[in-house]
Amino acid sequence: MSEARLLGDGPDADLPADNRLAGESPDDILVVETVGRDYRLPSGGTLSAVRDVSFRLARGETLGIVGESGCGKSTLGRMVLHLTPPTTGRVLVEGETLARLSPAALRRRRRTMQMVFQDPNGSLDPRLRIGAALAEPLVIHRVGSRAERARRVEALCDLIGLPREALTRFPHEFSGGQKQRIAIARALALEPSLIVADEPVSALDVSIQAQILNLLADIRERFCLAFVFISHDLAVIRHVSDRVGVMYLGRLVELADADAFFARPAHPYARMLLDAVLEPGTTLGGAPSGAPGLAIVQGEPPNPEHPPPGCSFHPRCPLAVERCRVETPPFAKTQGRMVACWRAG
Amino acid sequence: MSAVGLVSNGVLGPQAPAGPGQSPDLLQIDRLRVEVASAGTPIPLLDDVSLSLGAGEILGLVGESGCGKSVTALSVLRLLPEPPTRVAAGTIRFENEVVGSLSRRRLQALRGSRIGMIFQEPMSSLNPTFTVGWQIAEAVRLHTNLRGAALAARVRDLLALVGIGAPERRLAQYQHELSGGLRQRVMIAIALAADPQLLIADEPTTALDVTVQRQVLDLIARLRRERGMAVLLITHDLGVISGYADRVCVMYAGLVVETAPAGALFVAPRHPYTAALLAARPRLSGPRGRLAAIPGSVPPPRDRLAGCPFTARCERADARCAAERPPLAGTPHAVACWYPLDE
């Protein structure tokens, strides 16, 4: 247990030499280096929720992280903000290694990085009026005078398109979409430069989801915010992302520019994931194997407690060959993107 | 994949009997109004809901939270608690029998035997203290006279039918040992125990991953094809409806606002709400600009106007829409709107 809890600094030598795509700015706001998170299980085994994930994020850029339940995307998001310390590798925000920061320095650092969760009810204290909820981060970080804080809170209220009267009301008086707006405003209170949004629109109806996605696009542009946007919904990911990362069983299996990715995903899992999405107006019929030329992914993701040897996707992959069953493919550059697959291309 | 004509789903199986004078529908809901008691006047959950489902047909019931799609499904099986809810008007007929006047015994025979039902969350429908095999066997025992070896054989057949391999091992497992997709397959096996004519599937794949969703929906489509079972497929997901339903009913704020063959609905929606809902969705292709969000939110049941409930959010609405409720008119593509999109 003690070993699993150590906040190791990832050995720099393990960092893949070329893990960034051309065209990224040199002053990336976020650098994630070979991070992993292990959990010791009561049974004595180890569960690797995230393994060996590396990526960078430029200021104002949005990286979409997509994957199915249990793929480790939420754990990765929490590690980016050091809410869950990685057990291997390291996370740098604006050049500072989070694990090396003193508790006081980490607290200061947290002003610049915030999180938005799927369920706004979990982010809002039911007994706190909206005005107080929005002021709370400012109070905790001792920002401004009382009058300045009040002005900031009103500005936030305007920003998310709620009437000022909302500030004196309680969370239960608002709809789910409005509550998510408030949670977003609260995350913006300290003027962060990095936001991790974990399924921020997944609990919302389509008509409300569009409102929130538009709001996120507005604030992203206005404040030059960098986003790690986690979702299981590929259409949402396509809509918000500059780049896309696909996770499977704890690993990043593809990282590519959004346009290139959606034009042609390189990893077989990513391709099958995209093929499985049902869109209105396109038909897939009830044919057991889906549309011509496509295959539906068979089976379900394996138990992360006992990941298959070699490539984790090989038991479900129609392209798998002997090598895939034995050797873990490296996360390597191919076709202008990063892919972990022996058969990619 | 853009060949929209394929959406008619002729490949999927038997087409529903359509048009007047043909064989009667399996399920017929006629002007149903369901209310829930409150301190003041009762609040309507459903108002004037009419829909029909032919034998072997897949009818998609689509709408956002609170639109009444689940209340409609629960009303069919009379599973809503009475009180506080009450069927205030209208009738539900299943195989020409009025569900509201069935005796308790007949109602029991309807539930689970002639109509099977599956829900979004298989976890809360399965009993964690019994094995999967026991629970499937219980359903068979309840609805058939099979016992002993015949019963065991039937349970194994049901597992094979829903595509669960290694039956001996699975039968001895508990729900926590199964993945979400397998749990939903077990629920379908239980729902099929008595070979129902209608399967009501309420958000059957909403809790599942997209790859597993396709597997479960394909299973439902195959069962319909092979057994001629009708399906009432309830979902908020227009993509699911588009891929699997023959006809679609769009609900909004307790009303059916549009009903049409699936192909027609997605190519040329007539109700402004349906069109707005389709436009608000982020897409996998096409431009990535601003989404056409629908302003405002669904009015809560107690604040619904006399007129069309979409009035406050509708670009085309005028005074008439606020005052007068438009009837659902047109066949086979019906719309409840004073100013539908093709006029």
Image: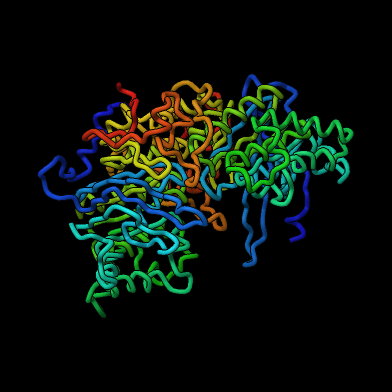
Residue closer to the observer: A121 or A51:
A121
Question: Where residue B219 sits: x, y (%)?
Answer: 31, 51
Report whether residue A321 is seen. Answer: no
Residue A223, percent from left and from top: 71, 24
State the residue at coordinates (66%, 40%). A116
Q: Residue at x 78, y 44 (%)?
A: A9
The residue at 58%/33% (across/down) is A212
Q: Nearer the viewer, residue B156 or A188?
A: A188
Q: Is residue A194 placed above or below B100 in the rendered structure?
A: above
Query: A36 or B108, which is in the foreground?
Result: B108
Q: Which quadrant does the N terminus of chain A fall into?
A: bottom right
Residue drawn at point x = 56 percent, y = 47 percent: A71
- Can residue B37 be spotted in the picture? yes
Is B45 situated above or below A164?
below
Residue most extreme to the bottom? B148
Q: Total marks drawn?
A: 0
List x then y, in percent, for residue A76: 65, 43
> Where in the figure is residue B307, as x and y percent of width and height?
40, 36
- Judge left or right: residue B108 versus residue A14: left
Q: Using the rendered view, name the quadrant where residue A53 is placed.
A: top right
State the image quarter where residue A211 is shown.
top right
Colour theme: rainbow
Task: Kindly give the residue lying farthest to the left in the view shown.
Answer: B21
Quarter of the view holding residue A336: top right
